Image (cartoon, rainbow, N blue to C red):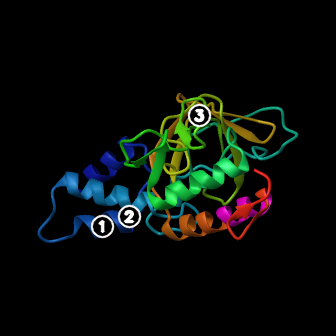
Amino acid sequence: MTTQLSAAITSQSLPPPSQSLLTSLTTRSPQPPLPSLIATAKARLLAADLTSSTLIDTTQLHPFPAGTDNAIAKEVRLGHNTHVQVVNIENLSLSRWEQIEELEAVERGEKTRGRQVIRVTDEGEDADTAQRLGSGTVQAGKNATHRLVLQDCKGTRVYAVELKRIEGIGIGKTSIGCKLMLRPGTVAARGTVLLTTENCVLLGGKIDAWHEAWMNGRMARLKEAAGVVNGETATR
């Protein structure tokens, strides 16, 4: 069962599980069915920190190649499947004020469509791919560009930008701690990884403490940058 579980996890491009995780799942009595074990392993791996968790076999992880974060380097290509986690995300298509409105909508569990409030679900449109409407609300669109900060297993942080729109990336859909797998050949140009649907496998996941701290800190930083005082701003 341990071999089957390990193979099933690997086939889904998930971070490699540690032997201790595999053992803890496969020595239960009575033994849960394989699909249940896979789901449990997936949830735990996607909520784990790539840099320190004992649930992940870090000896099988590949860090960014040397120079990936070097803004002077014209091009660096990844030579292996590289698992990374998201530590920051920003929608470059929105102004600071629009980002504030969007984060507030995410905190309420809502997005807006025209003048109607729509509840966000996992199956809904990406609330972060947005454009301004005449009504003053934010409408989901398909032309947003996101910049992320990705962290590898060694703790190295590198900027990444969508070269092509990737469904599922966006504030309200991509949580802090979310895992991605970058395929061999992925290019980092001038210290920025160029993300496409072909080279990026979005695995999902979330590290709750990181996400909460990011939400709180990002809102405060955006409001300060936008000149918001006590919930009001003189210039929008």
Please name the amino acid that badge 3 sits on: Pro
Are the residues at dot 2 and dot 1 in contact (C-beta closer than 8 Å)?
yes
Give the percent coordinates (x, y) of residue 178. Answer: 51, 54
Tell me the residue at 49%/67% (across/down): 208
Secondary structure at numbered mark 1: helix
Drawn side of residue 27 relative to residue 15, left or right? left
Task: Name which quarter of the figure residue 132 lies in.
Answer: top right
Rendered residue at 45%/46% (across/down) = 203
Judged left or right of residue 91, residue 179 is left
Decide if residue 67 is on the left or right side of residue 118: right
Residue type highlighted by circle 1 = Thr
Few, some or many residues within 10 Å of mark 3 (<14, 14–19, 20+): some
| Numbered circle sitting on residue 19 | 2
Q: Nearer the viewer, residue 157 or 82?
A: 157
Do the numbered discs 3 and 2 sit on residues whose CB atoms are within 8 Å? no
Q: Residue at x 68, y 42 (%)?
A: 94
Q: CA distance from mark 2 to mark 1?
A: 6 Å
Q: Earlier in the sequence, mark 3 or mark 1?
A: 1
Q: Is residue 76 visible?
A: yes
- Horizontal and vertical percent for residue 2? 27, 57
On the image, numbered disc 3 is attached to which residue? 184
Q: Secondary structure at mark 2?
A: helix
Q: Residues within 10 Å of mark 2 (few under 14, many from 20)?
A: some
Q: Nearer the viewer, residue 199 or 115?
A: 115
Q: For the N terminus, give its image quadrant.
A: bottom left
Q: Amino acid at mark 2?
A: Gln
Magenta stretch, overall SS: helix
User: Which residue is label 1 attached to?
Assistant: 23
Q: Which residues are magenta?
A: 218-225
Q: Is residue 77 magenta?
A: no
Residue that extends furthest to the left in the rendered view of this protein:
30
**What is the spatial separation of the Cα atoms under label 3 and label 2, in whole angstroms?**
26 Å
